[in-house]
Image (tube, helix red, strand yellow):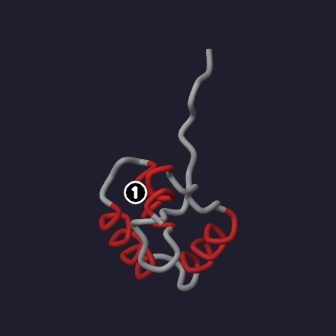
Amino acid sequence: MTTQYKQLYRSGNNRMIGGVCGGIGEYFDIDPTLVRVLFVFGAFIGVPGALALIYLVMLILVPQEPARDSETQAA
């Protein structure tokens, strides 16, 4: 019996810059636009540059979403 775990990926189809906010939205099953708005809002409220640094770290550490079979056949 295998258990499938959810894994955080950078979104391949729901991306604006690097797909980090899109991936977070897909992981938590919420609208990625809400994640982006909260990210920008947090950037104004929090320490300047802290969220940009977190975004860059996630951009490097979080893997890109693997291609699905239907997408690879269409390409």
Of 48 and 19, nearer the camera is 19
Q: Position of residue 67 (x, y in %)?
A: 54, 57
- On the rendered structure, is 61 left or right of 21? right
Percent across and percent down for residue 28 are: 41, 48
Neighbours of disc 1 within 10 Å: few (<14), some (14-19), many (20+)? many
Q: How far across and down, in percent of the image, does residue 26 sit?
A: 41, 53
Q: Secondary structure at mark 1?
A: helix
Location of residue 18 in the rendering, given as x and y in whole percent from the top left corner: 52, 75
- Seen at 48% across and 56% down, the residue is 73
Closer to the camera in the image, 16 or 71: 71
Q: Is residue 54 left or right of residue 25?
A: right
Residue at the limit of the structure toward the bottom, as seen here: 48
Residue at 44% in and 52% down: 70
**Residue at image coords 46%, 49%:** 27
Kindly indicate the quadrant of the structure image that contains residue 43.
bottom left
Is 28 drawn above or below residue 19 in the view shown? above
Rendered residue at 50%/52% (across/down)? 68
Q: Amino acid at mark 1?
A: Gly
Question: What residue is shown with label 1?
Answer: 25
- Choose top left, top right, bottom left or bottom right for residue 14: bottom left
Quarter containing the N terminus: top right
- Tell me if 8 is positioned left or right of 45 in this view: right
Number of residue marks = 1
